[in-house]
Image (cartoon, helix red, strand yellow):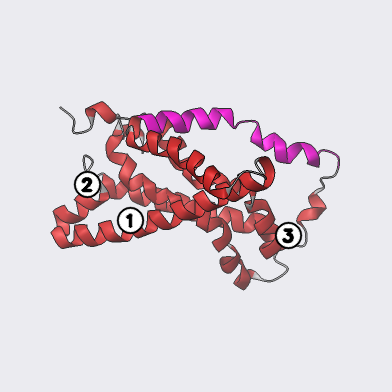
């Protein structure tokens, strides 16, 4: 019997869970940040960030194939000892707590600014954290299903950006290309890179895949 037989997720849920954590609240502010920091080269920074995230995803899949039924922490403990597993757990706890804090704070700020301006911040935080806690504690299968539901409910979001551009867009707005030179592009790529860093979650979701051979 599989180790996580009662908590398995499909390949689509695996992809959408990582996608949701990468995009998340950042989709609302990433265009502005890219425009401010990279200007007309923002699309180059976005492509570079995506390519790096894609490369990391392939590395994750290759690494986890050596220990398909265990998480990254179990893999570290298995090959490098118990202390390596504990150190890895500490690093990843700090990693996920940092990004969790950023996402929660930004979500509360957006809700406060656009939807609930007269509601106290503490109340918004509580209303945000309670359903989050219920979903997370329900298990990976519920999280995967929730990620799929949110993805399909948010399919209208690209129209939010594209419709206003129908009458004003022009390819010349992407010029000049590399006006600051190639040496400045890597630094500008850090902006989308912060959102793509959630790809590391794949280390922990991979063991829950029902059909691991379908990944790669």
Q: Quadrant of the C terminus?
A: top left
Residue 165 placed where, x, y %? 79, 42
Using a 10 Å C-alpha cutoff, classify the residue at mark 3 as few (fewer than 14 neighbours), some (14 to 19) or many (20 or more). many
The residue singled out by tag 1 in the image is 93
The circle drawn on residue 213 is none
Q: Which disc is residue 40 wearing?
A: 3
What residue is at 37 percent from the left and 38 percent from the top? 136
Q: Which residues are magenta?
A: 142-167
Q: Residue at x 68, y 44 (%)?
A: 114
Q: Is residue 154 a member of the stretch shown in magenta? A: yes
Q: Which element type, helix, strand or loop, lies under badge 2?
A: loop
Q: Please tell me whether residue 70 is drawn above or below residue 178 in the rendered image.
A: above
Position of residue 18 measured from the top left corner of the image (x, y, whole percent): 44, 42
Label 2 CA crowd tier, 10 Å (few <14, some 14–19, many 20+): few
Q: CA distance from mark 3 to mark 2?
A: 43 Å
- Where residue 158 appears, as percent x and y from the top left, is 66, 37
> What SS does tag 1 mark?
helix
Please say if 9 is above or below 183: above
Of 149 and 58, which appears nearest the observer?
149
Horizontal arrangement in the rendering, residue 73 relative to residue 197 (left or right): left
The answer, for residue 161, to whether it is visible in the render is yes
Position of 175 relative to 179 (above/below): above
Q: Nearer the viewer, residue 94 or 19?
A: 94
In depth, the one of 22 and 62 nearer the eye is 22
Marks 2 and 1, how far apart in space?
23 Å
Q: Between disc 3 and disc 2, whose residue precedes?
A: 3
Task: Identify residue for label 2.
Answer: 66
């Amino acid at each position: 019997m599989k180790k996580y037989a009662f908590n398995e997720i499909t390949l689509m849920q695996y992809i959408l869970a990582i996608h949701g954590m990468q995009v998340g609240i950042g989709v609302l502010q990433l265009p502005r940040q890219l425009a401010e920091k990279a200007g007309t080269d923002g699309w180059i920074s976005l492509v570079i960030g995506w390519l790096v995230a894609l490369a990391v995803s392939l590395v994750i899949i290759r690494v986890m194939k050596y220990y398909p039924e265990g998480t990254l922490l179990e893999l570290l403990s298995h090959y490098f000892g118990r202390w390596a597993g504990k150190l890895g757990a500490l690093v990843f706890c700090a990693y996920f707590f940092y990004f969790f804090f950023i996402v929660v704070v930004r979500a509360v700020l957006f809700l406060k600014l656009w939807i609930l301006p007269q509601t106290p911040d503490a109340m918004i935080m509580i209303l945000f954290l309670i359903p989050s806690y219920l979903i997370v504690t329900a298990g990976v299968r519920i999280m995967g299903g929730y990620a799929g539901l949110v993805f399909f409910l948010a399919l209208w979001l690209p129209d939010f950006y594209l419709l206003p551009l129908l009458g004003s867009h022009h390819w010349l707005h992407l010029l000049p290309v590399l006006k600051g030179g190639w040496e400045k592009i890597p630094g500008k790529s850090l902006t989308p890179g912060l959102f793509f860093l959630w790809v590391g979650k794949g280390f922990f979701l991979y063991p829950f895949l029902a059909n691991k051979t379908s990944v790669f």
